[in-house]
Amino acid sequence: MKQFSIVNLLHVFVLFLITTAVFGVYILLAIQNHFPQIEPIINGTEARPYVYRVLPSFIVMIISTTFGISPYLSSIIMMYISLIGFSFTILVLARLFLPASHVRSITLFAPIGLLPFLIYQRKIYDFPILFIFTLALYYLAKNNLVKYILIFAIATLTKETSIFLLIFFLLQFRNIGSKNIIFWGILQISIYSVIRLGVIYLFRNNSGTIIESHLKEHLNTYLQFPELAMILFFILLTTAGTILLKTQDNTNFLRNSLIAIGSPTFILYLLSGMPFEIRVFLEAYPSAFLLIALIATGFIWGTPNIKEAAT
């Protein structure tokens, strides 16, 4: 038991160090490349739809006011804590799906796998929404719907993509009984509607639009850089295809979450995202990472004994 505890403690320490190093790379890229101005986000003058993502800016304001530090430093603290939260939440989520003997080694790669998402563009809500989505998946996998609903509300205050969690819930839990699915479904729709309509009304006079359209920019950019476009879509489609084809039937929870979250994200990326801005796929990262990990464990160590977390 003592040896086991020491191994666990060592793993936690290494995971913490790796996550911190990844965040260091993120900050270095932000200094060299681009990080948005914090003040318009904090004071509510940012353009729509970015101003709608109110929770991270509120947390930054609280940290800044409480400790008397700049909004920029407060943002760094919030993002760092969110990334740490993601790393340790993906660890407990992985224990529900991955072979126990491989959980520690595989989860060390979870923060490292984020590096490609951090190269181009960055927002203060990226790591918070990644952490919140991972936590929402964990509570759904544990069938703890009360805590999930709380996280769903927090996710909606953070980013409008929380609607993808509702899509996943309806897909994954469609067999829990008509009364239950109607109750929990209507509850989530009500929470989402109240929060979304509230923030839309609150910031109705801000510049910008409720949803941006960048399809024309996508077409123009891909025509200018066809090689990069082919590489991007090849990686996205090959990764998604491999995951959906190679994973086993008893990984329905993860497969359904990837389909419900990843598919609409891809559509929104083409319609509203910026070309090559793959950070918008962060919400789908936890499901994709764990499914890739399952494929890797089967390929390297043989077919693992996987237990399904939720039906």
Image: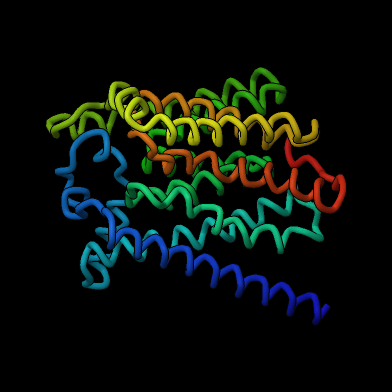
The N terminus sits in image quarter: bottom right
Visible in this render: residue 211? Answer: no
Q: Is residue 100 above or below residue 144?
A: below
The C terminus sits in image quarter: top right
Residue in view at x 53 percent, y 26 percent: 263
Q: Is residue 287 above or below residue 15?
A: above
Q: Is residue 5 left or right of residue 39?
A: right
Residue in view at x 53 percent, y 29 percent: 166
Residue in view at x 63 percent, y 62 percent: 108
Residue in view at x 87 percent, y 48 percent: 302
Q: How is the image coloured?
A: rainbow
Q: Is residue 54 left or right of residue 233?
A: left
Q: Position of residue 256 (x, y in %)?
A: 65, 30
Q: Position of residue 50 (x, y in %)?
A: 27, 39
Front-most of residues 34 and 90: 34
Q: Position of residue 24 (x, y in %)?
A: 41, 67
